[in-house]
Amino acid sequence: MNRFKTSKKLFAVLTVITLFLTLSITAYAKNPSVVDSAGLFTESQKASIEAKVEETISLTGVDIVIVTTNDTQGKTSEAYSDDYFDYNGYGLGEERNGILLLINMGDRKIHISLRGSGTNFFSDTNVENALDFMSPYASKGQYEKAVEYFLMDVQGLYNASINPDDGNNEYYGYGQYTEVYPNDQEAVVSPEPEKESQPPDTTSVIIAAIVVGLIAGGIVCLLVASKYKMKLGGYQYPFRAKSSVHMTLMTDTLVDRHVTQQRISDDNDRNNNNRSSGGGGSRINVSIGSSHVSSSGASHRGSTRGF
């Protein structure tokens, strides 16, 4: 009986240990946040990027994935990014919120894929701005810097979304977040304060203009007087002797008349015509977003840029 109780206790202990090891292995087997299949990063660079990714995940509450590859298996950068995110179990929360950045060396393209409403702080415009800012660094082979700036953009946009009225947390996108790139002189250019301009002294300008005008006018008057040999007493034109009027009688006779009539419609007529033609007389422009459905059936947003 004692042996049975001892075996039962031992079995319970082993069960607890097994469950603990299973949970530990599961936690350890979490999908990597940085998948450098193209070999673009050194070990130290990859470790630095992973640390920044975890920091961004903790701040935003959305999953962040960085993927590099030389082969997208015949898929577009968009399809490859969406499928990689969906079929590898990435994403946090019920909607599997997350952002995947793909550097496709095969086609030399960068793609940003977003899933879930938790990524709405990263709007379509912000995606385009981030691609604009990252692509020059990628074209120079500075892949680590491009990824770091992308992560800082994500953090800055998230902070701006949760603190819209905080004057100390102003964010304009792609590298213009306050205190974002303190060690990169290319990214941050502090504008010099504008010097207050002093109003010009208009009094001297007016006096000079009057003097110049008087001199020029006097010269012109002297030239005209010398040309026509005018006397100081004035010049009188002999208008009686040199003027005459000759009038001739002319008549016009009406031989025919042709009248054309055309009705000019008012605004009410135009409005009635618009209604009768269908469509209400106005055109409605519908703006369609960049959302699309991946092969897994999930909704994604995103954009691609070459480098």
Image (cartoon, rainbow, N blue to C red):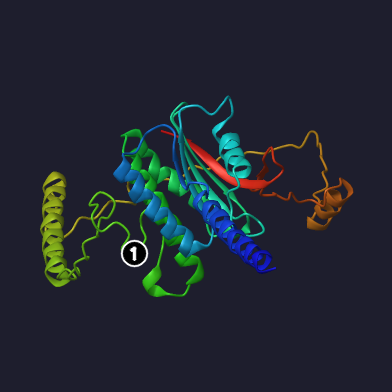
Give x and y (percent) for residue 155. Answer: 43, 60
* Secondary structure state at the residue bearing disc 1: loop
Residue lying furthest right: 276
Residue lying at 14% horizontally and 72% vertically, measured from the top left: 203
Give x and y (percent) for residue 282. Answer: 76, 51
Give x and y (percent) for residue 286. Answer: 70, 49
* Quadrant in which residue 8 is drawn: bottom right
* Quadrant in which residue 16 is drawn: bottom right
Q: Which residue is mark 1?
A: 178
Query: What's the residue type where badge 1 is placed?
Result: Thr
Where does the C terminus fall, quadrant-wise?
top left
Q: Nearer the viewer, residue 82 or 135?
A: 82
Q: Nearer the viewer, residue 82 or 272?
A: 82
- Up-down: is 135 above or below 125? above
Let me know if residue 174 appears in the view: no
Q: Is residue 153 left or right of residue 223?
A: right
